[in-house]
Amino acid sequence: MTLRQSLAAIRRHRPELRATEFNILLATYLLAAFNAGFWTRLTTIFKNDPLHVLLFAVAIWALTVFTLTLVSVPRIHRPAAAVIVLLAAASAWYQDQLGILFDKIMIQNVMNTTVDESRHLVTGAYVRHMVLTGVIPVLLLFVPKIRYPKVCHIVWQLPLTALTGFALTFGLLFVDLKANAAAIREHRDLMGSYQPGATIAAIYHYARMEMRSQNQIVTSLGTDAAKGPRLAESKKPVLMVVFAGETARAQNFALNGYGRDTTPELAKLDVVNFTHATSCGTSTAVSLPCMFSNLPRSGYSNEAFMATENLLDVLGHAGVTPLWWDNNTGDQYIARRTGAHRIDSTLDPAACEMGECTDQAFLKVIDDTLKDITGDTVLVLHMIGSHGPSYYLRYPPEFAKFTPDCRTADLVQCSPEEVVNAYDNSILFTDHILASSIERLKAQDKAVTGLIFLSDHGESLGEGGLYLHAAPWFMAPETQTRVPFLFWLSDEFQDVMDLDVACLRKKADRPVSQDNLFHSVLGLMDITTAARDPALDLSADCRPASSTTAEIPGPAKI
């Protein structure tokens, strides 16, 4: 028998399924293969009530059939089903292994990630999982023949089938609507762990968010900004260095009382450390834009951020040069009007010997800025910091103080102690970079200098089965929302700006947040503008009353 005859024989003997039968089988596979977290949560919520679990499960199964029915059109059906299987397989891996739930913010993180960042998440175990549960089943989708109704019947049968699945879902939920509604409302992680529904919904909401954010007319902010008398009368340029940290959590900062000495160099310096600082979000895509905007966490949204200018724009209006240097996933549109620079190996080859550049390269940026500075400047340095899962790449070998450290991106292959050791080493290196930057600023005499460090969000290191970050805010642990936040102000800066650092220290143990950054940078730099809210400026009441600049009334808090 020839090859052509063999293929013809295989095609003749392919099983045949109706489109509805195909969807029923696929829905059953999706719920069985990719919903371990969903089943665990469901049985926990309705423990000792197996009938309720069964009814809820059948309702979700019907919802999955309904979802597949929406794409049950010839030529579209199988490719769309293949995409759904692969999405569910990928989401289930990160959900089951790292405790990550997919919402629109997580999709935003995925879309904003870099090649270097994403390749650390593609481990050998992930590839095996995708091949066995994703790729092979997708290939099997193309084996059976699928029988569709005639075109004249599709127009009524497809909506009817979809309506039946939809009605079955809600009919079963209505059997005990009060309990089911309470479970969905009070345990948002339940439906957040349902695959493929959670990921499909996340993609939809992300697409809506992006469409609303694009092509917006940007509202001006702080066009009245001007240098106050202290800044204007300074005999030297004023340089404020703002380190936007990455994934540093407050709990592992020795300055905050952590049992390990992860900040030995900063401990020797005269810094003001705020011990109870919280983030705006749990991911870079949310927290970074939020902390540079005038929007508080309660009023922040991607659409609102994209529709108005931010701190860098206000600095520019005041005649202060904003500079952005990035060693991470980009400026998240913060510097889209003022421009941004990216760290690469040409800047400091030694800092990039391991393939990815460490934050050591920022010391060269500070040196170059000081060498060429002629005007007042705010230099923002967006760090790679403690970005996971490859914590071991964030510090050179000589900073591996805590050992054994996890030397792989597949964190579940390491012991909890190894994961924490690697993470703590990354904090130790951040301490070194910050302290080295401060020493450089202290040693020069070309500018009046200050430094701010504020991390964008924290990190889970396996506590409660969670790893990394970007948990939805409603379920985010404190390890992802408490962040280190500190000031260092040179003696000259304190004199020129007439600042009472003892006053700032009195606030060190009070609750603060990323809401304070926008207003505090303007306050520390002595920039007058109605965009600055004195209530959120940590330095507002830390100048002698006799020398306080007349305040321009601040806006009501959004």
Image (cartoon, helix red, strand yellow):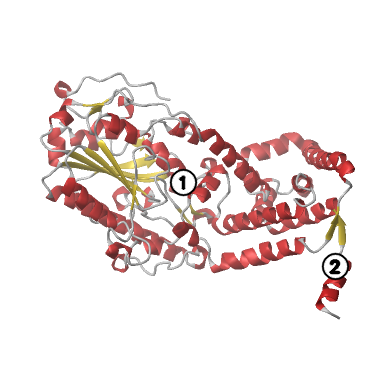
Q: Identify residue for label 2.
A: 11
Percent from the top left, x then y, of residue 368? Answer: 21, 51
Q: What element carries label 2?
A: helix
The answer to whether 487 appears left or right of 169 in the picture is left
Q: Label 1, on which residue?
A: 283
- The foreground one among 58 and 356 is 356
Find out whether the residues at labels 2 and 1 contact each other: C-beta distance under 8 Å: no
| Nearest to the observer: residue 426 or residue 108 | 108
How many numbered badges does the structure rendering display?
Answer: 2
Amino acid type of disc 1?
Ser
Residue 15 figure quarter: bottom right
The amino acid at mark 2 is Arg
- Residue 430 position, x and y percent, is 31, 55
Which residue is drawn at the image coordinates 18% and 43% (left, top)? 373
- When the figure is inspected, residue 249 is found, relative to residue 143, above or below; the finding is above
The residue sitting at 56% across, 43% down in the picture is: 104
- Which quarter of the figure has residue 228? top left
Q: Position of residue 455 (x, y in %)?
A: 36, 46
Picture disc at residue 1 = none
